[in-house]
Image: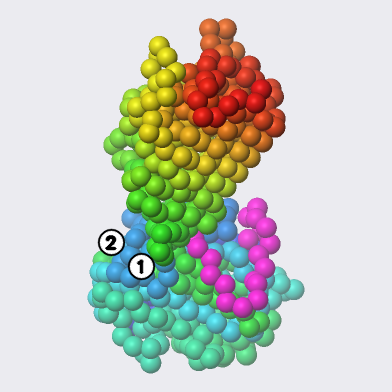
Amino acid sequence: MKRLILAAGIVFVAACGDSSTGPASSANISKPAFTLSAGDNTVAVREADIARQPEDALPTDTWVFYTRNAGTGTFVEGPDTPPLGNGSFQMSTPGSNDKGFLFNFDHVGTTLASIDAISYKTYRSAGNLQQVASLNIAVDPDGPSVSGGFTTLVFEPVYNTGQGAVVNGTWQTWDAFDGGNAIWWSSRAIPGVCATSCFVTWNTIVTANPNATILGGFGINQGSGNDGLTTAVDALEIGYGGNSVTYDFEDSNCHFTTSGNTMSLDGDCQTSTTILIPNDMTLDGNNHTITAIDPAGGHFLGAVIKNEGATASVIDLNVTASGLSNVCDAGDNRLRGILFDGASGTISNNTVSGVRQGMSGCQEGNAIEVRNSPFAGETGTVKVGPDVTVTITGNTVSNYQKNGITVNGSVVATVTGNVVTGDGAANYIAQNGIQIGFGGSATVRSNTVSGNDYTPSSDDACGLLLYRADGVKVSANNIFNNEVNLCNYGRGGGDVKASN
């Protein structure tokens, strides 16, 4: 098996080799084969996409960040205005022996001769002279048909003086192809290039090594003498055969693009606080995912998504949670996925799954909840309006803690075409699939509700729970495999008449 030498990002004067070993090839990675699509492609890369491994470990994922000593790499927002999106990947090497390198293994087997674009952009926050993150490619100079050869090719801006000097506090573009004229060096001697101290063009390397292929990682590298350096990197590009892919490094915060009355989610993200929808706005998830996480030193409080005014809509959004602390809260601090409180609007075509605190008995964790005060009291089902009007349609709800869909209080709701799936037999909480209660009115039609089953005999888990409602019309639902499919503790009359 071939071993690779990962070259250091040597700067300013003659380079010297780095004897540390690194990943051999993508053969160790369990991932689908990468296909470069036609044209220019942009792929977002976030923290969840990378593995973090010691320097000498073999790769286990498509993206791997390797470290030595105190070298660090983090996804950050900014700095300033990044070339793509809202974030970048920032590396820091405080000491001369520190190191970090972020490698991608999508392009193993690609011939150097076919490459026609390589570039990246950097923002140096701290450092001096011409130090900045380098670009590395682990290469088999002989091609796959001959065993034994390997090297790491290194591009550094310091040796490409025609592209300008490295400066602090601004984004700079480095063209590592430059029509084949970009200057590179090699960690080992190969035909046409001596080890570490010969600086030649890309075309020179390719001409002298016509069968050379990418053997391992392609990515960015900083360290081994670059002490006191902090560099952010974005828009890492590689192209071959006339097509290219650009990797957009993004922080994990939630960002939205607003146009008119729509706020569109830019990508998958995490939040440790409630995301509020401004009045009369639609949150369009673009089928991206928002994941709720605990804040540092605390636990998540309230809803993941909530209205801020009297009208809101949520469409095409995935909502989940990860690793939330099992702490019971009351009132506004109760956990929910999507919450409309005192608001009319639409909740449609969303997936809400895993909004919970583990296998918890806390009476919270409703996936979708619509509520409006005042609420019908425990002693009667008198209509207490005025009502808000909400449509809940086409959502997929599962792995919730307490209820799948909840409509409580002075609300008139249309609940149609949703798929609500509980945990099945459970002894920790009595789940309900759909609940209409405390003066709520609803049309409940063409929903599929299953898997709500509380094993202790003290309480019932219900597929459809009607509790002191003010008129519920139920039709064409598929409700099955619940402890009790229909729990009717007051369907009510009101403006919506029950059909069965």
Total residue callouts: 2
Dot label at residue 259: none
Q: Where's residue 466, x and y in %?
A: 54, 21
**Position of 227 compared to 250: left or right?**
left
Residue 27 in magenta stretch: yes
User: Which residue is located at x 52 percent, y 16 percent?
Assistant: 490
Q: Position of residue 281 (x, y in %)?
A: 40, 54
* Residue 298 visible in rendering: yes
Residues drawn in magenta: 26-45
- Mark closer to the chain start, 1 or 2: 2
Residue 85 covered by magenta stretch: no
Instruction: State the scheme by which the image is colored.
Output: rainbow
| Mark 1 surroundings: few (<14), some (14-19) or many (≥20) residues within 10 A | many
Per the image, the residue denoted by label 2 is 94
Q: Nearer the viewer, residue 201 or 421?
A: 421
At 57% from the left and 77% from the top, the residue drawn is: 40
When asked about the image quadrant of residue 331, the answer is: top left
Q: Residue at x 49, y 61 (%)?
A: 45
Residue type pointed to by label 1: Ala
When the figure is inspected, residue 258 is found, relative to residue 158, above or below; the finding is above
Q: Is residue 274 left or right of residue 460?
A: left
Mark 1 → mark 2, Cα distance in angstroms: 14 Å
Image coords of residue 247 (percent x, y):
50, 68
- Quarter in which the C terminus is drawn: top right
Asked which secondary structure carries label 2, the reply is loop
Residue 477 or residue 37, whichever sits in front: 477
Q: Does residue 148 appear in the picture of this structure?
A: no
Q: Nearer the viewer, mark 1 or mark 2?
A: 1
The x and y percentages for residue 392 are 54, 40
The image quadrant where one finds the N terminus is bottom right
| Residue corresponding to mark 1 | 232
Nearer to us in this view, 401 or 240: 401
